[in-house]
Image: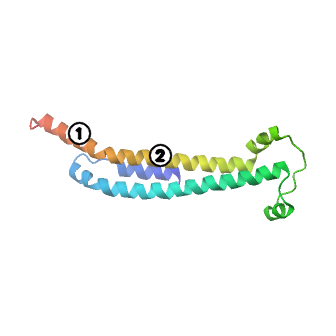
Amino acid sequence: MTLNELKKMIAEDMAIDDTELDMESLRIPQLHNKYLNIYLDEKLKLSKSISDYNILYKLKWEYYTGKMEEGKLKELEWEPFQYKILRTDIDKYLDSDSDLIQKEHAKTYQEEKVKYLDAVIKNINNRQWNIRGAIDWRKFLSGTS
């Protein structure tokens, strides 16, 4: 699920029908469960994304330092790195490596999805207070509070 699809789904689910506040209150556990399950799935994807990045980072480090075995190079279908670089310059190569950049973007994207879902769950947890506030306001306006 993309972030945009998730945003659209959340926008639909989080809308409160102010004519049926009692039903909205009863929906809170369902919404919480739905988004907690999505959050957990996305959190697991984040963990995998971080692991994938770290594994690729190590492989690229071995590649650029010339420590990668021939068999591993053939398995990955990479050509041997032709240059000798200083240890202080390895970061420049790693930071500009297109494969690592792609994995970093995927990891960052997943991190943002998890942060967004965390905020949504917090909002769902506060939803009861919002509904109660709306009910209290209506009571006040009608003079029955």
> Could you say where residue 70 lies in the image, as x and y percent from the top left?
86, 61
Type of colouring: rainbow
Contact check, label 2 and label 1, Cβ < 8 Å: no
For the residue marked with disc 1, what is the amino acid? Gly
* Closer-to-camera residue (73/31): 73
Q: Is residue 48 above or below residue 111?
A: below
Q: Which mark is residue 41?
A: none
**Label tally:** 2
> Could you say where residue 17 lies in the image, as x and y percent from the top left?
27, 48
> Could you say where residue 4 lies in the image, as x and y percent from the top left?
50, 49
Seen in the image, is 26 located left or right of residue 79?
left
The quadrant in which residue 73 appears is bottom right
For the residue marked with disc 2, what is the amino acid? Tyr
Residue visible at 47% across and 46% down in the picture: 116
Residue visible at 89% across and 45% down in the picture: 84
The kind of secondary structure element at disc 1 is: helix
Q: Badge 1, how many Cα within 10 Å: few under 14, some, many 20+? A: few
* Closer-to-camera residue (4/107): 107
The kind of secondary structure element at disc 2 is: helix
Name the quarter where the C terminus is drawn. Answer: top left
Q: Is residue 32 above or below residue 131?
A: below
Q: CA distance from mark 2 to mark 1?
A: 25 Å
* Closer-to-camera residue (92/137): 92
Q: Which residue is mark 1?
A: 133
Q: Which mark is residue 116?
A: 2
Seen in the image, is 137 located left or right of residue 78?
left
* Closer-to-camera residue (46/136): 46
Q: Badge 2, how many Cα within 10 Å: few under 14, some, many 20+? A: some
Residue visible at 47% across and 52% down in the picture: 6
Residue visible at 45% across and 49% down in the picture: 117
Residue closest to the far left = 144
Disc 2 or 1, which lies upstream in sequence? 2
